[in-house]
Amino acid sequence: MTRRGVVVVASNRASSGGYEDTTGPLVVAALRAWGFETADAVVVPDGVPVADVVRAAVADAVDVVITTGGTGINPTDRTPEVVGPLLDQALPGVAEAIRARGIAAGVPTAALSRGVAGVAGSTLVVTLPGSSGGVKDGLAVLADLVPHAVDQVRGGDHPRDDA
């Protein structure tokens, strides 16, 4: 069965042409390496446009949506506020593991990320920070989690240890 992913970049500056996003391609490459059919990242302003793309992906039963950006404490950072209400099941441990990875890597400001993760419909949704370092830390955590979580959302069983 084909697995599909969507990448959403929440960036007011990149969406207006102020600079070229570098985080979306990192996430797209990771999802493709993990076996997900994934188009190039969608770059939108933070806030409602992020929710619109996530909502459309959930309606299309995409397996995983990963966003970057908009998870900090800047007044324009709105990703958790617009994505959180779309989640049917929260997965706080995923967001905590991503923050912990950044802190362990020597980036204490990783604790300021307000990223969220969960399941919306049959779609796994994870919000990553907007920095390339934060995205790399997040992808290191997600490499093992995403394939397993997608299998679980599809009704898969836990692997057995019959040893």
Image (spheres, rainbow, N blue to C red):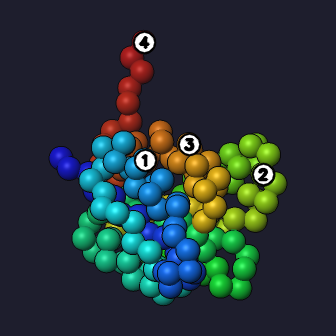
Where residue 163 is drawn, which disc sits there? 4
Badge 1 is on which residue? 30
Tell me where residue 67 appears, x and y as whole percent: 49, 66
Mark 1 secondary-structure assignment: helix
Query: Splitting the image into 4 quarters, where does residue 64 fall?
Result: bottom left
Residue 9 visible? The answer is: yes
Q: Are marks 1 and 2 in contact (CB under 8 Å)?
A: no
| Depth order, front residue of 156/65 | 65
Going by the numbered disc 3, the residue's amino acid type is Ala
Q: Are marks 3 and 4 in contact (CB under 8 Å)?
A: no
Going by the numbered disc 4, the residue's amino acid type is Ala
Please, is residue 12 above or below residue 126 in the view? below
Q: CA distance from mark 3 to mark 4?
A: 29 Å
Where residue 107 is drawn, which disc sits there? 2
Left or right, residue 94 beside residue 153: right
Where residue 92 is drawn, which disc sits there? none
Q: CA distance from mark 2 to mark 4?
A: 40 Å
Badge 3 is on which residue? 140
| Residue found 52% across the figure and 60% down from its top | 23
Q: Are marks 2 and 4 in contact (CB under 8 Å)?
A: no
| Depth order, front residue of 136/91 | 136
Q: CA distance from mark 1 to mark 2?
A: 22 Å
